[in-house]
Amino acid sequence: MPDRQPPSDDVLMDASAWLARLRADNRKPEEEQVFQTWLQASPDHAQAFEAVDNSWAILGGVSRTVPTGGISRMPRRALLMSGVGFAVVAAGTLSFVRSGAAKVYETGVGEQKHVALEDGSRLFLNARTRVSIQFDQSNRVADLEFGRVNFFVRQDAQRPFVVEAGQRRIVSQQCSFDVHREDQNVQIVLLDGTAKVMDTPAGHPSGNGKGQILHAGDRFIATADHYRLDRPNLKPLIAWQVGRAVFDDEPLMEAVQEMNLYCPEKLEIADSAAGRLRVSGVYHVGDNLSFARSISRFLPVSVHKDGDRLVLSATSPVTAR
């Protein structure tokens, strides 16, 4: 009998979100029942969850403790094919490199990169990202200068893993989390395990001192002078890992900034009226022309090409919201 086709990227994103929710320390019993209903709704759901659970266990070194309702082991080929769907971004360049101490890793437009560190931890860099890694006998330190990185931290009882991101410091021993930095604006999404977030001026790289403890499913959003903590829908936050951008009533200006990370053909907003329009939907990254054409079908904007730019202009007055 031929192997099943791998699950779609959308199903894999749903499976990843479920994995993080079920590993949260404060998950509720009714969430597990809803998960079982989702799991049994389609064979693709079980296949996707098995692939994601295996990937996280392998990459992050975490134990598999999520109730799966007796999912059978996937064929090796199906797992590998699902891994391809989970990791590859359209129009992105994926590379796999081994790190040493005091090394810098950087990606450009439309490029993503996997990095295996000497301690067994792994990084997944999004487009337009720069991070430096410094290991010594007492510390493991990553300095995120800009961009977004997914960290799978391997446990080391003698050396905590520290991520510096602007004025914030994330300290962990064994977990998985996303960090996104733009200047002093930082977003941290804890996917598995626990971590502590501190202000950079306080404490030491060893992780001493007070801080905000994050659990699986938590999001920490900080500017230069304040922060907030919430537990959002994880699907849009991890979509970049499977080559998608998910917008939920976002300003078109912000959606354009996200899409421009992945494509050399840049989108440009011609006027503030167009920038204030709201956009929702799931889009493949790396193809700004298709995105612009899609936007023009349901928003009052026109698209015209100007050299290597795609210019979006409002075609009718827009009421501020």
Image (cartoon, rainbow, N blue to C red):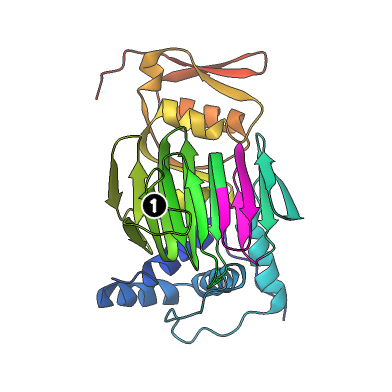
Say few, some or many: other residues with alpha carbon within 10 Å of mark 1 (under 14 / 14 to 19 / 20 or more).
Answer: some
Image position, residue 108 (x, y; %): 67, 35
- In the shown orientation, is residue 42 left or right of residue 86? left
Visible residue check, residue 269: yes
Q: Which residue is mark 1?
A: 203
Residues 53 and 267: in front is: 53
Image position, residue 8 (x, y; %): 57, 59
Residues 171 and 204: in front is: 204
- Where is 207 relative to 105, above or below? below
Q: Is residue 61 magenta?
A: no
Image position, residue 179 (x, y; %): 48, 48
Where disc 1 sits, the SS reads loop
Image position, residue 267 (x, y; %): 55, 23
Residue 185 appears in which quarter of the rendering? Answer: top left
Q: Is residue 125 magenta?
A: yes
Residue at the (29%, 43%) spot, across then down: 227
Residue at the (63%, 37%) spot, across then down: 286
Range drawn in magenta: 119-142
What's the amino acid at mark 1?
Gly
**Image quadrant in which the C terminus is located:** top left
- In the shown orientation, is residue 211 left or right of residue 310? left
- Where is 213 relative to 276, above or below? below
- Where is 170 relative to 155, above or below? above
